[in-house]
Amino acid sequence: MSKDAILFHKKLQGKIFVGSKIKKITKKNLQLIYTPGVAAVCKEIFNHPNTRYQLTSKANNVAIVTDGTRILGLGNIGPDAALPVMEGKSVLYREYGNISAFPICLDTRDRKQIVETVKAIAPAFGAINLEDIESPKVLDISHDLEESLDIPVFHDDRHGTSVVVLAALLNSLVLVNKKISEIKVVIAGAGSAGYGIGKLLYFAGCKNIIILDSKGAIYKGRKDSMNKYKNEIAEFTNRYEQGLLDDVIVGADVFVGVSGIRNLLKTKMIKKMNQNSIVFALTNPFPEIKPTLAKKAGARIVATGSFNYENKVNN
């Protein structure tokens, strides 16, 4: 697979390119495409700014912004090595949404520099997609951009992951005949994905949620390794339980793994869950538990984020 992927990319020398909607350039339309005709379009946008959505490609352009600090399954590999991933995401936007997406790989890890750079390039785009930036920095970046820009800011690890998890969970609950308002959900991982999943499940009606980081369950009043986002989590989740995963998974109906830790979930833990349990082990490239082991331990529905297994939940 690795050798094939390298040969595939070497042959293409990049998976994307900038194309033109103009099928044939003529002397007449060239004057409309560029000078002198384009001047009238510029004046129209200057006088009526909202027309930029009708007169340019802005509405269909997305900037995929990364600093390469949290590339899926690879970690901090920097902006150059992150480019193939961003190109791949651009291909998906084009093929499945007919959206023009542009990789923006920034050679800085400074939050303020990233925010100011995105604000500076925003006029050319209809939306911003933050991709594979380390947490909690990316949550600050997302908040700053949402406050200052007049276009949508989509954080893939937070918004994208939480949407697909909620969709998968709602379908799974139908199969096991449980209600979202009555289940206990344990989420391993308090980064961008865990934060986003927890918030969306809460607003969808799930009121018994426990989110864990490397120190254990997050709860109101915990002092160790907290930040403002974990404090926010503590406000709407877990009123009384403390301890590690082995402790809080007792009586859980659902496990969601976005921990980044291979084999975190043990079979003995699944046996402590309620009947007809649901296990989403979403860490890539190696899940928190192999599906065969999870099912053998008693899980009714098992999904991973990996293409190596059936029943995928990924974005």
Image (cartoon, rainbow, N blue to C red):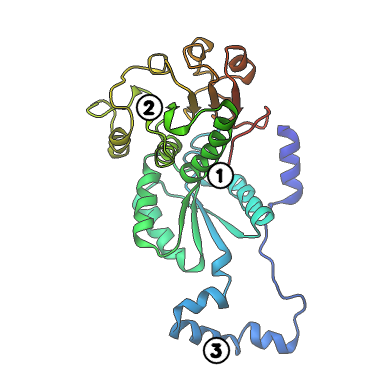
Q: x and y percent of residue 204 in the render?
A: 44, 41
Disc number placed over residue 40 in the picture, else none: 3
Q: Residues within 10 Å of mark 3 (few under 14, many from 20)?
A: few
Sequence-first disc among 3 and 2 = 3
User: Could you classify mark 1 by the number of other residues whose Cα lies within 10 Å: few (under 14), some (14-19), or many (20 or more)?
Assistant: many
Tell which of 88 and 239 is nearer to you.
239
Q: Measure the C-alpha gap from mark 3 to mark 2.
A: 58 Å
Give residue 146's quadrant in the image.
bottom left
Task: Give the quarter of the figure containing the C terminus.
Answer: top right
Dot 3 falls on a residue whose secondary structure is helix
Where's residue 269, x and y in %? 48, 13
Disc on the earlier residue, 1 or 3: 3
Q: Amino acid at mark 2?
A: Ile
What residue sits 22% from the left and 28% below the top? 221
Pinpoint residue 122: horizontal percent, then vertical percent.
45, 64
Mark 2 lies on a secondary structure that is strand
Whether 250 is drawn above or below 256: the answer is above
Dot 1 amino acid type: Ala
Q: Say which residue appears at 50% left-offset and 86% top-offset.
A: 44
- The picture places residue 106, in percent across and down from the top left corner, at 48, 52
The amino acid at mark 3 is Ala
Q: How many marks?
A: 3
Q: Which residue is mark 2?
A: 210
Mark 1 or 3, which is nearer the eye?
3
- From the image, which quarter does the N terminus lie in? top right
Residue placed at 35% from the left, 47% from the top? 140
Q: CA distance from mark 1 to mark 3?
A: 40 Å
Q: Residue placed at 38% from the left, 23% from the top?
A: 214
What is the secondary structure assignment of the residue under circle 1?
A: helix
Q: Is residue 179 above or below residue 161?
A: above
Circle 1 is placed at which residue position? 82
